[in-house]
Amino acid sequence: MELPADQLATYLETQVPGFRGPVVATKFKGGQSNPTYLIEAASGRYVLRRKPSGKLLPSAHAVDREFRVLQALHGGPVPVAEPLHLCTDESVIGSVFYLMAFVPGEVHWDPSLPGMTPEQRAAHYEAITSVLAALHAQDPAAIGLGDYGKPGNYFGRQIHRWSEQYRASEIEPIPDMDRLMRALDERCPADDGRVALVHGDFRIDNLMFAPGQARLLAVVDWELSTLGHPLADLGYFCMALRLPRNPALPGLAGMDRAALGIPEEAALLERYCKLSGQPMPADWPFVLAFSFFRLAAIAQGVAKRAQQGNASSDQASQAGQMTALLARLGVSAL
């Protein structure tokens, strides 16, 4: 997945004001889905996100949607990198891509935040919850995203969509996944009318903090964003409390969170509801189970791409093996 540096530099010099080559492109280790690169040019540092190569699932890897969200949110209360240019001409580097400003922040890959004091961890989690509530407070229509998704029946539509995506990338039968999909379909709540811009992959490693501070500089990786139910993001973030320690998706299960200074699930929910002005969830186990199901379907897609040889991360096979575990945790949550 190397980029044609000379061709890319020539193109960007004509499209991005002030951009000057030559460029050196270095792929970041993250980004299981859309490959992401640090672009070092004569004019400064940038970040490029592209679609992966090979056969892709329908509607997946929509970097153009990511770019649109960055345009809508930049400069507002939800911090994002400045979007600079969207290229839909696949002849430039072999796929659609976009360029954004480089954000000099730090990413915490482990939700236990090793090396911090309990007070620092608590402050980081407070900042995360505040930004999540701010995101869901945005009026999609007011920021130009009124047509960004289908409003209403979010959970029902997502269960149907990700069940199809899972079946399209299924490698071998996983009984817990079959059980989970049936149970979620039967237990899906009636639509309550709440619609918000949801991130879709809101976890700690998609957040960039000011170095050494509990201040968010950017929320990244908006590939799965849409108009949906705000509880989906909250449930997805809270999965980390229940995930076991593992190298692919490190969780917090079994850790002494009180000693670490990391809030318990009930405290996270209470703070989010206070900040957002929303009531406590009526069926929180469903929200959690839905989150595990959705991530399991995503992990299965990663495994399929690894099998086909076009996954964008060397951890793809490892992440794909998480599907069965996630399905089991989803069944347990219900």
Image: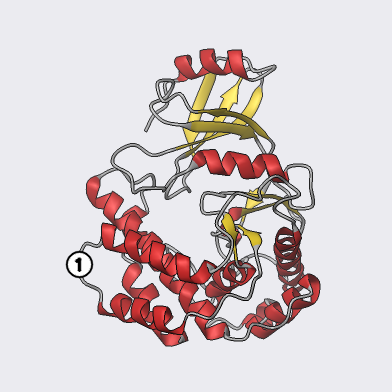
At x 25%, y 44%, the residue is 309
Instruction: Kindly indicate the quadrant of the structure image that contains residue 325.
Output: bottom left
In the rendered image, which quarter contains the C terminus?
bottom left
Q: Is residue 265 visible?
A: yes
- Residue 53, x across and y down, in percent: 34, 36
Residue that badge 1 annotates: 172
Work out whether 59 lies above or below 249. Answer: above
| Quadrant including the N terminus | top left
Front residue (pair 204, 212): 204
- Asked if 317 appears above or below 258 in the picture, the reply is above
Q: Residue at x 44, y 45 (%)?
A: 61
How many discs mark residues in the rendered view?
A: 1
Q: Residue furthest left?
A: 172
Rendered location of residue 177, percent (x, y): 32, 75
Q: Amino acid at mark 1?
A: Glu
Res. 215 image quadrant: bottom right
Report the residue at 53% width, 67% height from top. Answer: 154
- Helix, strand or loop for disc 1: loop
Q: Residues within 10 Å of mark 1 (few under 14, many from 20)?
A: few
